[in-house]
Amino acid sequence: QVQLVESGGGLVQPGGSLRLSCAASGSIFSISAMGWYRQASGKQREWVAGISSGGRTIYADSVKGRFTISRDNAKNTVVLQMNSLKPEDTAVYYCNLVRSIGTMTPFGNWGQGTQVTVSS
């Protein structure tokens, strides 16, 4: 069973940057697509970015051009580089295994997430 641990969140001013990391255990990581999701207070969890096992990427319209997802299969890590952050990016961010970046349907167990707060 894959365990996922997110890190890198924090408080940042609008326009700032953060780099989130997701460390995954288990050999399935290298053959699985991965995704980043977020859940703002009082809202449903939504997908933010996805990356296939081969490195193809997809982004939600709200973050396109500002966020970059990448992966290091040797380290079982997926990273979300977030630039030009906006207050509306404030949320708890999670990573998960996904069946395909075409659907962004998660299928692993959710980790604890990492809080991102964008505020002046």
Image (cartoon, rainbow, N blue to C red):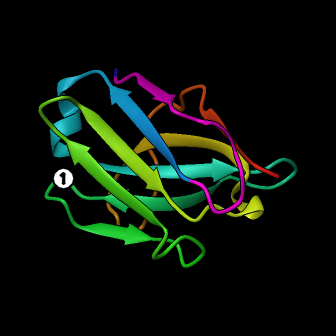
Q: Which residue lies at the image location 59% right of the left edge and 32% below the top edge?
A: 113
Q: In the rendered view, tell whether residue 56 sits above or below residue 52.
A: below
**What is the three-letter code of the residue carrying label 1?**
Ser
- Residue 111 drawn at (x, y percent): 54, 27
Q: Which residue lies at the image location 75% right of the left edge and 63% below the top edge?
A: 88
User: Which residue bears the numbered disc 1?
Assistant: 53
100 part of magenta stretch: no
Disc 1 crowd, CA 10 A, few/some/many (<14, 14-19, 20+): some
Q: For the N terminus, which image quadrant?
A: top left
10 part of magenta stretch: yes
Marks counted in the figure total 1
Quadrant of res 47: bottom right
Q: Left or right of 42: which side holds 40?
A: left
Which span is picked out in magenta?
A: 2-16
Q: In the rendered view, tell whether residue 18 sits above or below residue 101.
A: above
Q: Which residue lies at the image location 28% right of the left edge and 52% below the top edge?
A: 70
Q: Nearer the viewer, residue 86 or 22?
A: 86
Quadrant of res 28: top left
- Residue 13 drawn at (x, y percent): 72, 52
Q: In the rendered view, tell whether residue 113 sits above or below residue 97.
A: above
**Tag 1, which secondary structure?**
loop
- Residue 41 drawn at (x, y percent): 84, 47
- Residue 38 drawn at (x, y percent): 63, 50
Q: Left or right of 60: which side holds 117?
A: right
Quadrant of res 16: bottom right
